[in-house]
Amino acid sequence: MNYKLLIKISWITAFAIAMGYLESAVVIYLRVIYYPEGFNFPLVPMESLLLVTEVFREVATLVMLLAIGFIAGKDFTERFAYFIYNFAIWDIFYYVFLKIFLDWPESLLTWDILFLIPTTWTGPVIGPIILSLLMVWLALIIIIAKGRGKKPALHKIEWSLLITGSVVVILAFIWDYSRYVLARHSFVELFKVSSAELQAIAYDYMPTDPFNWVAYIFGVLLIVSGILLYQRRIKLFPLR
């Protein structure tokens, strides 16, 4: 890895770690206010303004991560690599800082609210961390290959495995909450339910163990297969 590329990755890593700290700081404030005895389900009711703010904060975070990818990369594949690298480092250090300041999560199997768009994602903390490590792996292969003058574009079969695996993993994350909501209202009825009623449903939600590990592991295996196939084809770190 050449010196300029190393410096570039170092600054992007620093940015992602700083973003992870800012994200954890917001959560720390909310938990001190709403969960003084420690975070747990069911959720404590929050004002509508805060909920809307949280959703748009997540949108803003994605825009920032995408912006770094667009600025750092020179083509679609390289921009994608910097985006997922940035996302992964941000997500990992978000949990690192929560552990440092709140001694939370208690373990990697502790359930958390992972995302709110387009619906609530929940699952054990280890779930997003594993995905983040996979993103770092794929991103570094692309970035280093590009730095060595290779053409790192992914082929259709590799994209298919990565995208399909990602969709399956997302389904695993939204499975529990979606099943909980649909047990109370049909999909069609959800479009007629008031936001206040939806919030009331969300505040009564308790995660159901076990997590949908079957779907999650299947999705992860698809993603790993796509990365291994790509790594073997690109011949950056030859696989026998």
Image: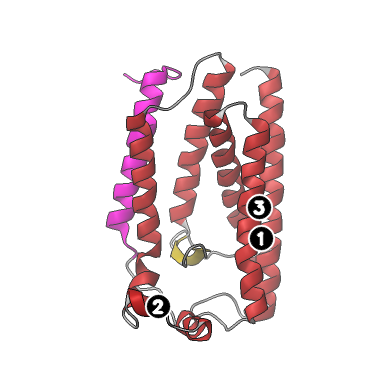
Cα distance between the residues tagged 1 and 3: 6 Å
Question: In terms of image quadrants, where is residue 59?
Answer: bottom right
Camera-nearest label, 2 or 3: 2
Q: Is residue 232 left or right of residue 61?
A: left
Disc 1 marks which amino acid? Ser
Q: Is residue 197 left or right of residue 4?
A: left
Residue 61 location (% of width, % of height): 64, 54
Disc 2 marks which amino acid? Leu
Disc 3 marks which amino acid? Gly
Camera-nearest label, 1 or 2: 2
Whether the residues at callouts 2 and 3 have beta carbons within 8 Å, the answer is: no
Which of the pair 202/71 is nearer the observer?
71
Q: Main secondary structure of the magenta part?
A: helix
Q: Which residues are the magenta region?
A: 211-240
Label 3 secondary element: helix
Residue 24's mark?
Answer: 1
Label 1 secondary element: helix
Sequence-first disc among 2 and 3: 3
Give the crowd class for mark 3: few <14, some 14-19, many >=20 residues within 10 Å.
many
Label 2 secondary element: helix
Q: Which residue is disc 2 drawn over?
A: 190
Q: Which residue is disc 3 drawn over?
A: 20
